[in-house]
Every structure is written in C-alpha cells, then in structure tokens.
Image (spheres, grey):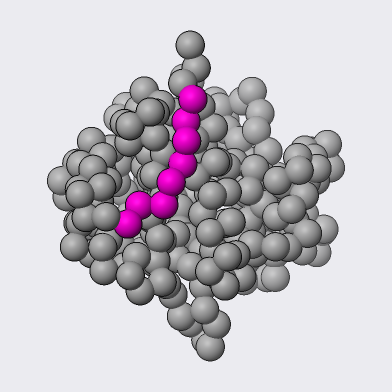
Amino acid sequence: MKPTIHYAVVTEAVSMREVEELQTIVWGNSTISPTPQLVASVHNGGVVIGAYDQDKLVGFCYGFAGYKHGSVSLCSHMMGILPQYRDLNIGYQLKQQQRLWAIDYGYQKITWTFDPLETRNAFLNLCKLGGIVRTYIPSYYGEMADEVNKGLPTDRLLLEWDAMSDRTLQAAAGTLLTSEVWSGYRSLVEWVPLGSYARPVQRHAIEEEAGYLIPVPRYIHEMKKDELELAKEWRYTLREQLQEALAKGYVITGLLRSEDPVHYYVVEK
C-alpha cells in the first residue's frame, strides 16, 4: 500500500538530529550539514522541510538565505529521501512545499546545483519544476571521496527557479512545453552503442538554430561502477558542449527522455 506522506517545516533541534541521521543514510558521514548549522540557518532566513510517513522522517530538503549581485534568493542546498521511499513523488512535493514557503517568506527565486550526469534530477528540476540553467560550474566541490562523487570531477549545473514565473506555474499545472517540439532539434554529439552504454564519438559545431540536443548517459551510476573511464569521457564531453552552448546565449530548458542508452539535454535560445 502506498504510504500517506505529510510535510512540515522543521525548527526544533531534536528534529534536526533526525535530519542529520537521514543524511548519513543517504550520503554517508562525509557529506552532511550538521544539526547546529541547520538550527542556525532556520533562524536566519533558511528552512528545513521534512517528509513524514506518520511520525517517521523519510525525506527532507534544506535551503539557506543567499545574496549575489544585489539579489536575494533561497539556496536550496540539500534534498535527500530514504531509498525505499523513492519513486513516490516525494522530491517533487518537497520542492513545491519549499517554493510555497519561499513565497510566504518573501523570496522570488530559488537556486541549487545538481550534477549534469544525474538525469533523474535533471528531469525533476527542468521538466517537472520548470527551472532553467544558465551556468555550468566545473569541479564545484573539488575532489570528493563519497560513494556518489568519487572518481569524477564534481561539475555542477546551477538551476534557477523563479517561484512565480509563467514557466514555473505551467510546470506545476503540467502544461509546460512538450517533447514533441524538442525531438525536432539536432544533436550536437554523435554516439555509438557500447554494450548497454553509449560512447560519444563526434561533436558538431553550434550554429544559430533555435535549439539543440546534447546526449547524456541514462545509466551513470552503473557506468561509474563498470566503466569509470567512459563516465569521465562523458563528463568532459558534457562540460565542453554545455559550456559552449551557454556561452553562446543558449539556456538549458529540459531533458528529453528516450529508449536509447542516452537521454538528451535541451538547450534553446
């Protein structure tokens, strides 16, 4: 039976310790925001929202106040969900709860980073939530040794989520631009099958078309275990192609999913 999940803003230190414990389950001890930091943040413009199955914490998201170039935003730093509770739309609901809290608190924009190789996160962030990406950051966290990041440069995309934009509201209503339009765009990278994976083999120049597709592996977690050098090849291919597209005025607006061993980032003017 599908559990009934409810959501609540977390403020008390004892509840923050549950959030800290959940982080260690998801990422291990090397990548956590400790309880004192969480408590200090929520008293200074930040927020922690928990997802609960009855009284059990099964997921959370955490954001703190940010300021850059004269503009204030909510930096959504972490979101984690227990493995057995994934695929229940909890991540989407946590983000929507965070957006509603941000609006009430006076924020207009929410930002966060994610790994461009993580297509599951990309689809949520771009297609289901309606965020966009204008910025690629190579090796954002430097070298990391945790299970998720070890062996690869920690490149990240900076997602910008306007809390009340037409795009965000369309995404919430399920009426955002469909993949029928995106499928007509030309791919900037050719690839060939390699077992159950794919290898990038040829890149094309960016001209002045309205949009392009940039392939990204579907099975990056398995690839990192089986073919780490191939995963690195994709890391650097994506870095080059996405940085070039962004530098030429394109914006990452979606992820086109396919039955191939790759999905495709959508970049548009």
Q: Nearer the viewer, residue 73 or 249?
A: 73
Q: Which stretch appears magenta?
A: 4-11
Q: Is residue 264 visible?
A: yes
What secondary structure is the stretch in magenta mostly built from? strand
* Residue 207 shows in this picture: no
User: Is residue 212 or residue 134 the one in the foreground?
Assistant: 134
Q: Nearer the viewer, residue 169 or 52?
A: 52
Residue 58 position in % (x across, y down): 35, 33
Residue at x-position 51% and y-position 72%: 73
Residue 253 percent location from the top left of the image: 68, 54
Q: Is residue 225 above or below residue 127?
A: above
Q: Work out which residue is located at the far bottom of the displayed protein and give it.
A: 70
Image point (57%, 48%), residue name: 96
Task: Residue at 26% x, 69% y: name it.
Answer: 40
Q: Quadrant of residue 100?
A: bottom right
Position of 258 with respect to 26 (left or right) is right
- Residue 215 point in image, percent of width and height: 60, 41
171 sits to left or right of 106: right
Residue under the image location 68 percent in, 38 percent down: 256
